[in-house]
Image (spheres, grey):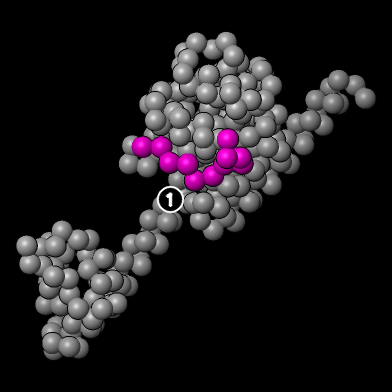
Amino acid sequence: MAIGDIDTSYRKVQADHFAALALELHESRGLTETVQAVVEFSLQALTCSHAGVALSVRGRPEVPAVTDPVVRQIYEWQMELRAGPLIESMREHRTVLVRDTAVDTRWPDWSAKVLSLGVRSVLDVPLTTASGTVGVLGLYSVEPDAFAADDQAIAAILARHASVAVATARKEQGLSVAIDARKLVGQAMGILMERYDLDADRAFAILKRYSQDTNTKLRDVAVHLIKTRQLPDSRS
């Protein structure tokens, strides 16, 4: 087989892999399932030992999916130190490569900790949408200088797939939460309307006042009323 044929075959395999990933992400039922699919696919498509996804939640990283507890430990050290490739990738919206933790001097404390876990190479790729960076895909290898140019290109494509999927899953999750909250508030309003012979506007006004007086989310006031048949104590 000629070199050109090998290259064509390799590209076809990669295209098939990404087609399968796109289908799996499309069929994922929630945010957790989406990011888990991404990290598991990373192990198949790239020469990495471990993978993980950290998402930006209200400006802070959270770690919903990893392929090994080692990855979670690596992320937690960066969050604690507020320094490392994950933090830089998320803040600067760019890919960060650590070729060898044994010699990298940018984050010496973090590098030493990661090296103690047997991880030598790190590749952090931002998950970016039109609204900004939603997270970072982290790839880890026990081999030094494990991520060649081809690996970085594949990781970038994977990150683009993941970015759209994560953003979509978050939007759907937010809509689901909003719908759930409306249902709960409606149920609580129904209880007040039946018990005190109120109209809908008056029942909603009462829930809103208790929400403000107790500094509690309207949804939580509704849940309290549904469970206990009592409104929260608004006394200071």
Residue 62 in the image, given as x and y percentages of width and height: 43, 41
Q: Residue at x 51, y 35 (%)?
A: 73
Relative side of 217 to 117, left or right? left
- Establish if 31 lies above or below 93: below
Relative side of 221 to 63, left or right? left
Residue 138 in the image, given as x and y percentages of width and height: 55, 32
- Establish if 187 lies above or below 60: below
Work out whether residue 187 or residue 103 is closer to the camera in this orientation and state it: 103
Residue 75 in the image, given as x and y percentages of width and height: 48, 33
Q: Residue furthest front?
A: 116
Residue type of the residue flagged with mark 1: Arg
Q: Quadrant of the C terminus?
A: bottom left
Q: Residue at x 63, y 34 (%)?
A: 50
Task: Decide if residue 80 is in sight here.
Answer: yes
Q: Residue at x 64, y 29 (%)?
A: 154
Q: Is residue 11 magenta?
A: no
- Neighbor class of circle 1 (other Cα within 10 Å; few <14, some 14-19, many 20+) is some
Q: Is residue 63 magenta?
A: yes
Q: Secondary structure at mark 1?
A: helix
Q: Quadrant of the N terminus?
A: top right
Hey, which quadrant is residue 234 in on the image?
bottom left
Residue assigned mark 1: 170
Relative side of 41 to 159, left or right? right
Magenta-highlighted stretch: main secondary structure?
A: strand
- Which range of residues does the magenta coloring cover? 60-70
Q: Residue at x 39, y 34 (%)?
A: 132
